[in-house]
Amino acid sequence: MFYHDKKTQYKVRVEKPNPAFARMLQQAIGGIEGEMRVCLQYLFQAWNARGPVKYRDMLLDTGTEEISHIEMLATAVALNLEGAPLSVQESAIKQDGVVGAVLGGMNPRQFLSAGLGALAYDAEGVPFSGAYVVGSGNLMADMYTNVAAESTGRALATRLWEITDDPGMKDMLSFMIARDTMHQQQWLAVIEELGGAKGLPIPNSFPQSKENQEFSYAFITPNIDGTGTPEGRWTHGTSIDGNGQFSVLKAQPYGDEPKLAPPVPEGHAQTEQMTVSDTIIGNVKDAFS
Amino acid sequence: MFYHDKKTQYKVRVEKPNPAFARMLQQAIGGIEGEMRVCLQYLFQAWNARGPVKYRDMLLDTGTEEISHIEMLATAVALNLEGAPLSVQESAIKQDGVVGAVLGGMNPRQFLSAGLGALAYDAEGVPFSGAYVVGSGNLMADMYTNVAAESTGRALATRLWEITDDPGMKDMLSFMIARDTMHQQQWLAVIEELGGAKGLPIPNSFPQSKENQEFSYAFITPNIDGTGTPEGRWTHGTSIDGNGQFSVLKAQPYGDEPKLAPPVPEGHAQTEQMTVSDTIIGNVKDAFS
Amino acid sequence: MFYHDKKTQYKVRVEKPNPAFARMLQQAIGGIEGEMRVCLQYLFQAWNARGPVKYRDMLLDTGTEEISHIEMLATAVALNLEGAPLSVQESAIKQDGVVGAVLGGMNPRQFLSAGLGALAYDAEGVPFSGAYVVGSGNLMADMYTNVAAESTGRALATRLWEITDDPGMKDMLSFMIARDTMHQQQWLAVIEELGGAKGLPIPNSFPQSKENQEFSYAFITPNIDGTGTPEGRWTHGTSIDGNGQFSVLKAQPYGDEPKLAPPVPEGHAQTEQMTVSDTIIGNVKDAFS
Amino acid sequence: MFYHDKKTQYKVRVEKPNPAFARMLQQAIGGIEGEMRVCLQYLFQAWNARGPVKYRDMLLDTGTEEISHIEMLATAVALNLEGAPLSVQESAIKQDGVVGAVLGGMNPRQFLSAGLGALAYDAEGVPFSGAYVVGSGNLMADMYTNVAAESTGRALATRLWEITDDPGMKDMLSFMIARDTMHQQQWLAVIEELGGAKGLPIPNSFPQSKENQEFSYAFITPNIDGTGTPEGRWTHGTSIDGNGQFSVLKAQPYGDEPKLAPPVPEGHAQTEQMTVSDTIIGNVKDAFS
Amino acid sequence: MFYHDKKTQYKVRVEKPNPAFARMLQQAIGGIEGEMRVCLQYLFQAWNARGPVKYRDMLLDTGTEEISHIEMLATAVALNLEGAPLSVQESAIKQDGVVGAVLGGMNPRQFLSAGLGALAYDAEGVPFSGAYVVGSGNLMADMYTNVAAESTGRALATRLWEITDDPGMKDMLSFMIARDTMHQQQWLAVIEELGGAKGLPIPNSFPQSKENQEFSYAFITPNIDGTGTPEGRWTHGTSIDGNGQFSVLKAQPYGDEPKLAPPVPEGHAQTEQMTVSDTIIGNVKDAFS
Amino acid sequence: MFYHDKKTQYKVRVEKPNPAFARMLQQAIGGIEGEMRVCLQYLFQAWNARGPVKYRDMLLDTGTEEISHIEMLATAVALNLEGAPLSVQESAIKQDGVVGAVLGGMNPRQFLSAGLGALAYDAEGVPFSGAYVVGSGNLMADMYTNVAAESTGRALATRLWEITDDPGMKDMLSFMIARDTMHQQQWLAVIEELGGAKGLPIPNSFPQSKENQEFSYAFITPNIDGTGTPEGRWTHGTSIDGNGQFSVLKAQPYGDEPKLAPPVPEGHAQTEQMTVSDTIIGNVKDAFS
């Protein structure tokens, strides 16, 4: 279960409120690479955790930390909105570009729906989706998913850092970027602890004898312009998991043209689909006559 | 640009059509861990690729291969639906459980909306979302995202392999599982080629001097039940990137309680929010009188 | 900021795991009337709170409690899935209805995507949406929204209580139903504290002199079958806010037929839309010749 | 503006309530080919109509009729749910297939969220989306969109007619199928009135001299298996609009390989993307040593 | 069933078309607090109504009125778009801010997809969702949901009133604000008619003896910073429903740490999850060597 | 299966990068009338095709061509973003309108989430949805759906052509507009080949004797303002399919007021809904006393 205190995990200061930046910050709240996603992802992974308990506990810790990050960002949004222009009236148009560039560049719903506050949405006003929350039941798959989330999340945070020059916001983001560094590290540490390459391919509990091993380490190139694909680590040498040798295959079909049964009567396709009919041939003739 | 031939990349055979399995296969088509996602993800990453051209080319190759996988799965859905019961009539109820367990366990829309065919939806009938398609502009972040996608994708494929005993379906899946093996390998090969740990933290182009390094390698534990978090690779020793030493910090607030300005008049909060009013205090008194 | 311990807020016991019930419980996790919604709703309302601090603090308290409720439900899902049938093979079809009624009535993604665990989705597999999270910036509007959420939430919990006979699940739900009782009470207590009817209409900071008061207390009936609408508290007597007298108006248009300008050339409507043309008239004539 | 009376447009009778059929009917309410879509589509097209007023008026008429169709279907859902089994208890499992095949095959939310009523969702529990509502501002494009909607809608209605044997439901559907017939006819009648082929290509207000006419009537075949595409009406002869001659072109690239600029520093790609670096080459060498 | 006439319910005049305001108005059409939501919500509640018929009839009346409100707003959008700049060309950039602040601040899809018309979307271009439409089957829960919808809806309308200075738009909104006043009143009137506090807790048909009454009137505070939660109407005294006494409880766990079974083989977790293995311990040792 | 080469189907040149135009182009990628939709629509229709193989082959050809169109548009987005302003700093505000009109009018996620690249989203940042992909199993219904898609798609392309003055972009769009012309033609050619009006009503495999033919060719007008609906091709004369005579009917109810059963106990409606109670009547009296 969960507790809180009223202070934030780190300082949230805004010296020069900027409604356009309030819009940008929404991406770090409700975007696919944002904090709601990692928060819920780590918590659901913890709650569904089967196997060694220590990973469950670690996931709970970091999932809990992420709630505090959503709080900081939501607070930053509210502070950045203070002083936003709130009019689409004509004088504003003349001075600031059309309509103050729509209320100072903010998401209009931050005013219309929230009275100058944060929303559970991304920077384009798209609602956060539970579909972003991945917990596969396979610990290694989840750890790679988490590294990915913290990598795109840290990229987002560095971009936000670049587009603001507010010292308070830069300071808050420098904390969050550091936490993303650590979170990348800790998921990679679990991967190392679980054996690194020994854990591959993921899931490693499926016997490789049951996959079609002819295709397990072959790079398939469907490129037909004659230039091929440049050589790389993936085209020859021992595979990363040490279980095979990389090779290159030109793409080709190993299957046939699909043959589907005719439509069932209850599905009410067009009559012409049900029998390859003289009618169709007749119509074609008509069309050319 | 793109070309096709009419044959499938690998054999698609169904010996015993099973409409419930047709529903399951939809997850591998339109689910977040499915083939539409990786197909579009690799293609968008290729189209947006800035930097060394070889990665763009490789992404194009594998993105193109994945279109062929969607085709195989869609064909498998259509074949599994042949012979599905198409009635909610009473006699069916008596024999097969309620209403033939809803048309043999299939997604009813596979009949109602597609006349016994595949949909761009997942196993629960939720439409595929472009939000699943991640291309961050950072190659390393993208590679981890791709490993994650192929890991959850291969887990899905092995689960589908387990729940069917149709030899044709098992054969097709054994091919797809092998391709997921290779695709995990090739994204990991790029990570290795880009320097592995030298690429951390992602993005490595942001100077770590600008993050708050006090917090870059500290595991923060907000657990307050006195049991702490078990030790692990992430609690001490040199960090995975080699740039720091792991440590543990008990969670504590470094910030203050947020102070937001009062509501602006144009936002039409309740009057009672605008001034900490005697009215409210009066009302409380009234409530107890 | 936030903390946790490893125990759950209340006991989560499942005596007879039931995968169909695991599906139902998802509604209480990720549905519009579920715990993710109220959790995030109260937290965002707190983070955006402007005005008296005590309401912010109370919202933080209850928002934090709701995280613990999601945890209990997710745990209940995982426990209900233990022992679920995992096959669409033929023998299962013969015995249990078609395909074990699709893996025992569970959401197939609870297996395929989560390895027998909870998802951030509702009972029909639709992802939780940030759009469910309402925080309007008006405290009274938010309180009514919260009463509504706890009313539909408690209705859901009582329905879940009815369809299970597992003593552990009934016990857990009897706790949650009690908490929903309290949460309804506390939001109503805020409404009372803010003056009850004195807070109406919401927002009460908009001067009623600026609304078109001719229509502020009139029930408009667009019913034209001659039977009218039955009388009720809303058809006569003093209004609930005490500011007017209810009356009944038969619906009628006070406006005119809309007149829109013709299409702009850049919008490329059909040519026939741009001038009320002789061509159209000609075509009509042709059609009848 | 709008009025109603309390009776339905056509009889809604259910002799043998069937909760699985209640689920199916949801597709006709909230599905992309359902009545909410056509209702809102015709109304929005009317409200946005620029050009001859008669089409606006006709769209208003039929949009209004469709509200009555939603009403009939929602009523049919409520009636089909009466008597649904409401238990996941063990005895039900033994008798009827697992958990009565999940409450008789119904959408569980029809009970959990609506207390045995209709939802604004499709047959798979996916919420209706405003994205289905197309009104392009081009009358001809809208008319073809409407014919398409009524065609998939009528296909759906005939499939629903097939899977039920309830005489009341068959009767209601036979009315709706007839209305879909008429609605197809009337949108086609507008197309004829607007000149039929003279209205092509849509929009006809864009001068064809500004399109690249080399490609306006050529069927491009990217098939490379040597079998080509079978001949059809679209491969030779005068085009449907009479403005060109159909021909066939083998697909080929007329463009070059894209060349994107390197990443901007503020976007924080990996360092290795910014300069084609010796580091990468070095890493590759390391990988093979 | 439903009827219409061609006039609007109230005057829709726009003196100074403003494309940025056209974007804002979309929130009142397709937003969660908009007219499509209340329209469909009241109609679905009516169509699903079980119990006293008078509430069904009232819901039908007001649901029908709301269609007329969507019509007024859609018309207002179309009128506000007339004269919008339609170019991203360079001269515009120089004069008006970048690209005329994107076509005058309008939603670009109002031009691109609708040819200068309204969409079934909110102010951020997110499609209306059927998930917003709540009809719980419990009349009291529905009435609170409706009060909530009209409260956030009226707050939205007053904010729109503030940001425009067009006399026609202010006049139209003053009518809509008045109607929101009445609609709040009438749902509250039903609550009063159903007994007010006697209807609590909602649903009142679930016997309170079956909830865990130890927790029914206790405010639980998981705040651990030592400052507690300020006193309020909800911390002591008789509860709002008169059935209990409010009290305060410090949050504590009444449950245990969850214990989930190990993963099933078919779910293909990592091997390391299936047995708490020596391998893991070995790997950890390796990591530190 | 599928192949590619590295060149684009047609030239993609951008002379004056324009981030606002990059946003607009997203509609042609991920919007409902965009290329992802038609690409996937034609491919799914092909993969599900039952009946004459030639249509399957043609759909595969054109579906494959559309992948190349997505590629061109994504490339155009990346090129248009080069040189975009990347700052919300104060000096920018002063010069260019508020915050450079939010980063030059671009979708902020094109920078924040993609590092200056294309997304699988529309012009308003809403993710592409698999729900846009229609394949009904009825060939004629699909062909009309395809004509509709290419009509709204061509309208979109002409509007994009109008708002840019970049010669490279105009050239690329003039190619795409031409391809949309051809694609309209080819789907219409299939309709002609299938018999044109002989294929009506769609589906033509449902016997018209089973629809309620009294209503098959009657235009129903629910207009009650006395002005009626103007005459048109749809009000009299032979129907388009030649099977009937158009007529006009004034709307009237053929059904009764719905009668739903009272709520079931397990659904926990309010007690007052279950019996038409004296309590309610009493409460009403109280309300007026």
Image (spheres, coloured by chain):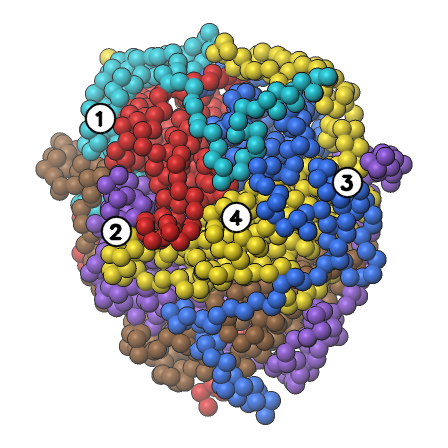
Chain colours: A red, B cyan, C blue, D brown, E yellow, F purple
Q: Chain of mark 2?
A: F
Q: Find residue C15 and report its horizontal and vertical position in percent.
A: 66, 21
Residue tagged by mark 4?
Answer: E161
Residue drawn at (48%, 61%), measured in percent from left and top?
E15
Residue drawn at (80%, 52%), measured in percent from left and top?
C229
Quadrant location of the N terminus of chain B in the rendered image: bottom left
Quadrant location of the C terminus of chain B in the rendered image: top right
Comparing C243 with C24, the one in front is C243
Q: Evaluate whether label 4 is on the same chain as label 2.
A: no
Q: Chain of mark 3?
A: C
User: Are discs 4 and 1 less than 8 Å apart at CB?
Assistant: no
Residue tagged by mark 2?
Answer: F81
Is residue D216 positioned above or below B71 on the image?
below
Q: CA distance from mark 3 to mark 4?
A: 28 Å
Q: Evaluate whether label 4 is on the same chain as label 1.
A: no
Q: Find residue E232 and report its horizontal and vertical position in percent.
A: 62, 18
Comparing E6 with B232, the one in front is E6
Residue tagged by mark 3?
Answer: C238
Residue tagged by mark 1?
Answer: B210
Residue drawn at (54%, 61%), measured in percent from left and top?
E13
Q: CA distance from mark 3 to mark 2?
A: 61 Å
Three-letter amino acid code of the residue under disc 3: Thr
Q: CA distance from mark 4 to mark 1?
A: 45 Å
Three-letter amino acid code of the residue under disc 4: Trp
